[in-house]
Image: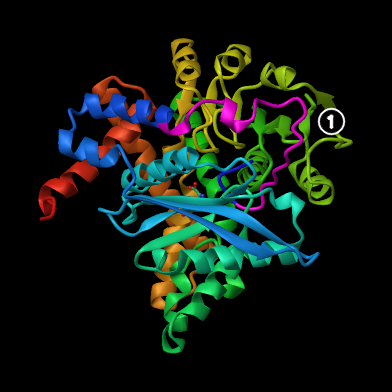
Amino acid sequence: MSTDASAKASPKQADTAPSLKDRGNLFEIAGRQVDKAMKLINLDDDVAQILAQPKNEIITNFPVRMDNGKFQIFKGYRVQHNNILGPYKGGIRYHHEANLDEMKALASWMTYKSALHEIPFGGGKGGIKVDPRQHSKTELERITRRFTAALGSNIGPEFDIPAPDVGTNEQTMVWMMDTYMNIVAQSERNSVRGVVTGKSVTSGGSYGRREATGQGVVHCITEWAKDKNFNLDGAHVIIQGFGNVGTYTARLLSQKGAVVVGVGDVGGYIANPEGINPHKLSEHVAKTGSVAGYKGATKVTREEFFGLEADIFVPAALELELGLKEAKALKVKMVVEGANGPTYPEAEDYLLGKGVDVIPDILCNSGGVIVSYYEWLQNKRSEQWDTADVLARLEKRMKQTYANVRQYAQAHKTDWRTASYAIGLERLQHCYRERGIFP
Ligand code: GLU
C-alpha cells in the first residue's frame, strides 16, 4: 500500500510478508530511530521525554448499520503526538490490522516530517480497524461518517487535521468534511472546510495533491541522481505497492525515461525486464484490485522481486516490509521510502554498510503533507491555486529540505535518517526552549 489514497488491502496475503502483528512493535522501532538522533544532538531530557509519548491517544468503539440491516462495532483511533509547531496533522488509515502502536509510530513520524520541512503543523495519525475491500461504498460512507462524528471536537481546522492514508482516499475525506460541517454551527460551515485535506478539488481540495507524494519521491530521486551523476534515463526501478504513491512514482519516473521492471502489491509480484507501462498497469489495478495477473509482465515470487536487477527500489506499501533477508537480496543503488517506516533498522544498517543510499520516509514521502499544507492555506484564504503554482512550491520545498539534509549528514558524518530527525528535533527543541513548558 502507500502513505496515501486509494490503496487497497486484503486479509488474504499470498506470498507476502508476515501479518503486521508479527512484524514487531512499530512504535518501539520508531523510538530506536529517533533515539539515535536525540543522542547525536544531545537533546534536552525534558524535550526527549515529551516526544517519547503522544499527547493524546483516542480510541473509540462505534456501531454502524451494515447493508443487511445488522450492526457491526468498529474500533477507531486518533493519536495526537505533538502540536508545539502547529495543529496535529496526519492521515487516516483503513486497514484490518490497524493498531495503537502503529498509530503512535505513524503519528510521531508526522511530527518529525512537518518539523523537518518547516511546515507549521504537528503530528497525528488515526484510522479504523477495517478492511475497506470487504465493504460496499454505502457501508464505507456510514463507517466514515460515524467515526468522524465520534471524533467530534477532537478534530478541527485549527486543532487536528486528518488526510488520506492507506485504504482511504479523496472520497473518504469529503465524507469526513461534510460530516464535520454538519456538526458545527450553520454559520461556521464554510469556514471549517480545512478540517481535512486531500479532498477532491470540487469539494475544496488542492490541485496537485493527488500526485504530490509520488512527485516528492521523484524530486528526491532526481536530486540524488544529480549528486551521483547517475542517468535516470534507462534506469531500472522496482516498486512495492501500487496505491497512490506507487502509481504516481511509477508514472513520473517513466516520464524521465526510467523503466519500471518490477511491481508488487498485496495480491502478488510481477516483473518484466523490458519495462511495465504504469498507465496500463493502473488500468488493470482499477479493474481487478491488484497488479497480479497483469498481461504485460510475468508473475514472480516476493523473494524474486527483491532480487531483480534494478538501480532503485521504492517501497510504497506498508511498514516493515524490508528486513535483513530482503536487504540482502536487493541489488539496487538506492532505496527511497515512499511508505512510512518500511525498513527495519538492521536492514538499513546492512544497506548503508554496502554503500546503498537510503532516503528516509520523513524526507522523501512528505510531498503529501506539504501539499496538504497548501490545501489548508487555500481553504483559509478561500483561494484556488493552479497546478503549476502548487507543484512549483512543492518542488522548491522538497529540494531545499533535500539540500539541508545532505549538508547536515555530511557535516555530522551521519546517515540521512538520523540527519532528518536531528533537523526536526532541533526545531522542536528550539520552540520548547523559547516558549517554555507550561505552567
Ligand atoms: N498520509 C500522508 C503521510 O503519511 C499524508 C498526511 C497529510 O497530508 O496530512 O504523510
- The scheme the figure's colours follow is rainbow
Q: Where is residue 240 in the image (x, y as percent from the top left)?
A: 66, 32
Which stretch did the figure color magenta? 5-27
Q: Mark 1 points at which residue?
A: 297
Question: In the picture shown, does residue 222 fall above or below 94?
Answer: above
Question: Relative to residue 74, is residue 13 drawn left or right?
Answer: right
Residue 22 included in the magenta stretch of the image: yes
At a point 55% along the width and 45% down the height, the residue shown is: 3
Residue furthest out toward the front: 70
Q: In which quarter of the image is residue 246?
A: top right
Residue 160 included in the magenta stretch of the image: no
Q: In this view of the protein, can residue 200 be seen by the observer?
A: no
Q: Position of residue 194 (x, y in %)?
A: 45, 70
- The chief SS type of the magenta part is loop
Q: Position of residue 249 (x, y in %)?
A: 61, 42
Q: What element carries label 1?
A: loop
Question: In the picture shown, does residue 353 fall above or below 90?
Answer: above
Q: Mark 1 packing: few (<14 Cα in 10 Å), some, or many (20+)?
A: many
Question: Relative to residue 78, is residue 278 drawn left or right?
Answer: right
At a point 66% along the width and 43% down the height, the residue shown is: 255
